[in-house]
Amino acid sequence: MKYIKKNQEPVKFSNWKALENDDWKPNWDDNFQKPEKVIVHDSLLQEQGYICCYCGMRITRETSHIEHFKPRSSYPNLALDYTNLIASCQGESEEPPPVPVHCGHEKKYWYDKHLMVSPLEINCNEFFKYPASGEIQPTNDPAKQAAAETTIEKLALNINKLQNMRRVAMDAALLGIEDLTNEERQQLAEGYEQLDSNGQYTPFCAAIIYLLKNYF
């Protein structure tokens, strides 16, 4: 999981919400459609570097959906709060429906502030470790293990599909790594923490960074 630094919400989204009056109120279900929804979706993708907020796989508008970190069912007042919106993989309109289900669609309406690791918290990466096998595991820190274990389970982050994708991404990143010095490996890890020239992060960069910093 990679930390998401939230930006200011899009001006057009703010202006749309500001149109609220006695006869009309902005509402997620009834009138949050084009162009406002598309504008918000694109903004979320951009601030996340086009990777899923939870698993870190590459996403586009077509292969992702707008996720409420704190679910609307329990926090209706946050339905249109930009600070509560992130982009998760598995789009609403993908055909056929993606199987197996994971990340936002698997999480559904679950949320526990004590047991859900948030990608909006700057230290979210400290809750997990990534062996070269492609698994995601809880950290060794006892204070963080319960939240890490629960988050992995609730988001189905350890299904075979994601393990295989992580392993392929890590294997590709390790090609030729033996010839690098420790300092060069650290510099390489730091490079994966940055956006590329297209404004994108490398898919599963959190796992790659962990591997480069902890296994050499």
Image: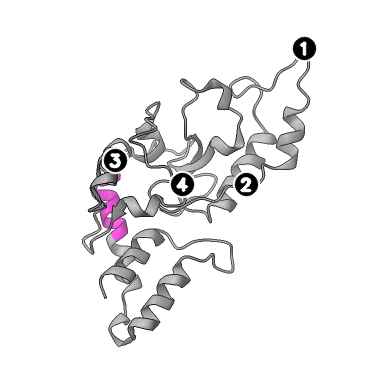
In the picture of the structure, the residue carrying the numbered disc 3 is 156
Percent position (x, y) of residue 205?
A: 40, 61
Relative to 131, does residue 120 appear above or below in the rendering?
above
Residue sitting nearer the eye, 122 or 92: 122
Contact between labelled residues 4 and 2, with CB atoms less than 8 Å apart: no
For this orientation, the residue located farthest to the top is 23
Give the mark, 3 or 1, whose residue is nearer the N terminus: 1
Gap between marks 4 and 3, in whole Å? 20 Å
Residue at disc 4, secondary structure: loop
Mark closer to the observer (4, 1): 4
Q: Which segment is the magenta one?
A: 156-166
Label ID, residue 121:
4
Label ID, residue 43:
2
Q: Viewed as shown, does residue 185 lie left or right of 61?
A: left
Give the mark, 2 or 1, whose residue is nearer the N terminus: 1
In the picture of the structure, the residue carrying the numbered disc 1 is 23
Answer few, some or many: residues within 10 Å of disc 2's Cα (few below 14, many 20 plus, some between 14 and 19): some
Answer few, some or many: residues within 10 Å of disc 4's Cα (few below 14, many 20 plus, some between 14 and 19): few
Give the mark, 4 or 3, whose residue is nearer the N terminus: 4
Give the mark, 2 or 4, whose residue is nearer the N terminus: 2
Mark closer to the observer (2, 4): 4
Residue sitting nearer the eye, 43 or 215: 215
Answer few, some or many: residues within 10 Å of disc 1's Cα (few below 14, many 20 plus, some between 14 and 19): few
Percent position (x, y) of residue 89?
A: 44, 44
Amino acid carrying mark 1 in the image: Asp
Contact between labelled residues 1 and 2, with CB atoms less than 8 Å apart: no
Gap between marks 2 and 1, in whole Å? 29 Å
Residue at 52 percent of width and 54 percent of height:
50
* Residue 110 found in image quarter: top left
Gap between marks 3 and 1, in whole Å? 43 Å
Amino acid carrying mark 3 in the image: Ala
